[in-house]
Amino acid sequence: MSQTPALPRTLVLMGAGKMGGAMLEGWLGGGLSAGGLAVLDPNAGEDLTALAASHGFRLNPPLADLARPEALVLGIKPQMLDAAAPSIAALAGPDTLVVSILAGKTIADLEARAPSARAFVRAMPNLPASVRRGITGVAASAAVNPAQRAMTTALLEGIGLVEWVDDEALIDAVTAVSGSGPAYVFHLVECLAEAGIAAGLPADAARRLARATVEGAGELLHRSPLEPATLRQNVTSPGGTTAAALEVLMAENGMKPLMKRAVAAARQRAQELSG
């Protein structure tokens, strides 16, 4: 497969854990040239070593052997930023796009660790990225040019959809909605199963019914061009069972205000962690 034009010719990935590894597999499957790719991960396991052997990218080469790349993607843990700072500073030059998925670390934090670099992108992916069905919220520094924005989109599309926001401060809201959002859905499955048990279903059956219902509804939402409200209305017969349940969920003290409070709490905590 020929390389997608927007993808960088040279790229260094620093940290190939769950999220970094998911991105790496997406890039390789999407046409990124392995010849221009290097991965730095001191904890590289057998799977990463085998992937490097099969695709031909460099794994943990000496830092001195690496030229400053077009793109440097930071997939390390946020608490490792200070330890990695000398390597980041050595690799990130004036023409390097620095893409960070470090939760809670601001563009200002990155600028302080890479003083030679100018173009920074802060990204917030979510857990479904591991199955390439994620969505990543992205904010850029003022120096990021259109070609680098296209490069960022191409890199992050390897793990799902990409949503740009104009203001970095909105990344905290992105974190609260989509970054933490999968946990809300998983908890919905738990609650639905418990409600089924309370209604008399055997526990195993209730859990299977709840899980499959959310899986199927999610896939329908994915495939359908209709708005969620329209899909909800389509399954709700006037005076029927769904309508009775929705009267509870859509009451003044129902799901909408509860979700608003939950997202507000997550956003506040994100602001505290990044501040």
Image (cartoon, rainbow, N blue to C red):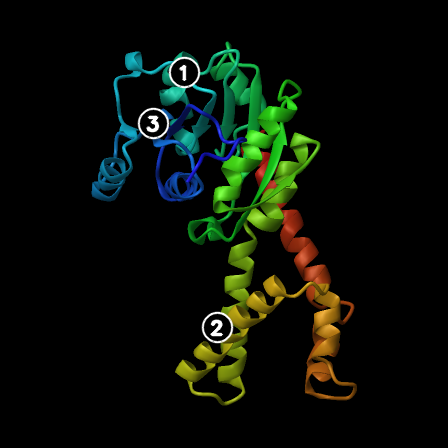
Mark toward the viewer: 2 or 1: 1
Q: Earlier in the sequence, mark 1 or mark 3?
A: 3
Residue 19 placement (x, y as % from top left): 42, 42
Q: Which residue is mark 1?
A: 91
Residue 270 placement (x, y as % from top left): 58, 39
Check whether the beta carbons of the residues at disc 1 and disc 3 lie within 8 A of each other. no
As shown in the figure, which amino acid type bears the numbered disc 1?
A: Leu
Secondary structure of the residue carrying numbered label 1: helix
As shown in the figure, which amino acid type bears the numbered disc 3?
A: Gly
Mark toward the viewer: 1 or 3: 3
Where residue 62 sits, quadrant-wise, is: top left
Q: Compare residues 69 and 36 and report the one nearer the observer.
A: 36
Q: Which residue is mark 3?
A: 35
Where residue 123 sits, quadrant-wise, is: top right
> Considering the image in quadrants, where does the N terminus appear?
top left
Residue 93 placement (x, y as % from top left): 48, 12
Q: Residues within 10 Å of mark 1 (few under 14, many from 20)?
A: many
